[in-house]
Image (cartoon, helix red, strand yellow):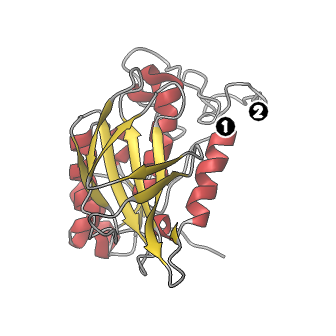
Amino acid sequence: MIFLAEAFTRPKVMYDLAKLGFSQCYTYFTWRNTKEQLTRYFGELTQTDVREYFRPNLWPNTPDILTEYLQYGGRAAFMARLVLAATLDANYGIYGPGFELVENRAREPGSEEYLDSEKYQVRQWDLQRSASLKEFIRRVNRVRRENPALQRDGNLRFHRVDNDQLICYSKQSEDRQNTILVVVNLDPHHPPSGWVELPLEELGLQPGQPYQVHDLLGGARYLWEGARNYVQLNADVVPAHFLLLRQRVRTEQQFEYFM
């Protein structure tokens, strides 16, 4: 039997409740959409004493909440928010089937309530709808399961990108053998590009040596050099990169390969 003590209210009260045992908490992630908002909020959750007693749970939507970003951002917005929820924190969830079926109609302008809310009726869902995100969700969850870096809180580090519509951050496993770099397009209508700057030594990479970045969502592999590299994300395809970092090493037999 599992007892879950959960709370959501004003930040100060919510933090006080977390100290009393209501540690599994809904968060304000749902309404943090810009790079500045996300960076500031998750800096508070992961880089201050809040991390010692507060266990965030990230939800891009709930039965009660359909944000404006999802209402007007279309499929790309749903994908971007899923990636952010699944990688910024170790605990996340979605309200479905509404989320995977990209349900984005609000009850009225300015409302965050679903038009066809299950609170008022029994819904019959077409789970085979062609627009379903179920395969994308399955890929994201597989990457989370296979990479220890994404299974921890407190190991989140943001990195500079010279475009405010792109956000970049990394996570590492405790033994530093698994490093994931995430780049997300925050603009669901355009394909922004920019230059990512990485602290190579902090990420276990040797300055002056090329390294491989393997996109675990799309499968592509890129060879990067130095701290500054170019990225571009197409909102109509996959608005995010899950990049596994691999350093080139030399063995005693003088063969070079990536780990």
Q: Is residue 64 visible?
A: no
Dot 1 falls on a residue whose secondary structure is loop
| Left or right, residue 115 beside residue 135 | left
| Left or right, residue 12 beside residue 193 | left
Task: Tell me the residue at 25%/55% (across/down).
Answer: 227
Q: In this view, which residue lies farthest toward the front?
A: 254
Which of the two residues, 45 or 250, is positioned nearer the viewer here? Answer: 250
Q: What is the x, y in percent for residue 138? A: 66, 48
Q: Looking at the image, is 173 positioned above or below residue 60? A: below
Residue 127 bears which disc, if any?
A: 2
Which residue is denoted by mark 1 in the rendering?
97
Q: Which quarter of the rendered picture does the N terminus lie within?
A: bottom right
Q: Looking at the image, is 213 positioned above or below residue 121? A: below
Image quadrant of residue 34?
top left
- Sequence-earlier tag: 1 or 2: 1
Q: Are marks 1 and 2 in contact (CB under 8 Å)?
A: yes
Q: Give, as a three-letter code, the residue at label 1.
A: Pro
Task: Tell me the residue at 55%/38% (across/down).
Answer: 63
Q: Residues within 10 Å of mark 2 (few under 14, many from 20)?
A: few
Q: What is the x, y in percent for residue 209? A: 33, 64
Dot 2 falls on a residue whose secondary structure is loop
Task: Tell me the residue at 58%/57% (across/down).
Answer: 143
Q: Residues within 10 Å of mark 1 (few under 14, many from 20)?
A: some
| Left or right, residue 161 beside residue 102 | left
Q: What is the x, y in percent for residue 108? A: 45, 15
Q: In this view, which residue lies farthest toward the bottom?
A: 252
Q: Give, as a three-letter code, the residue at label 2.
A: Leu
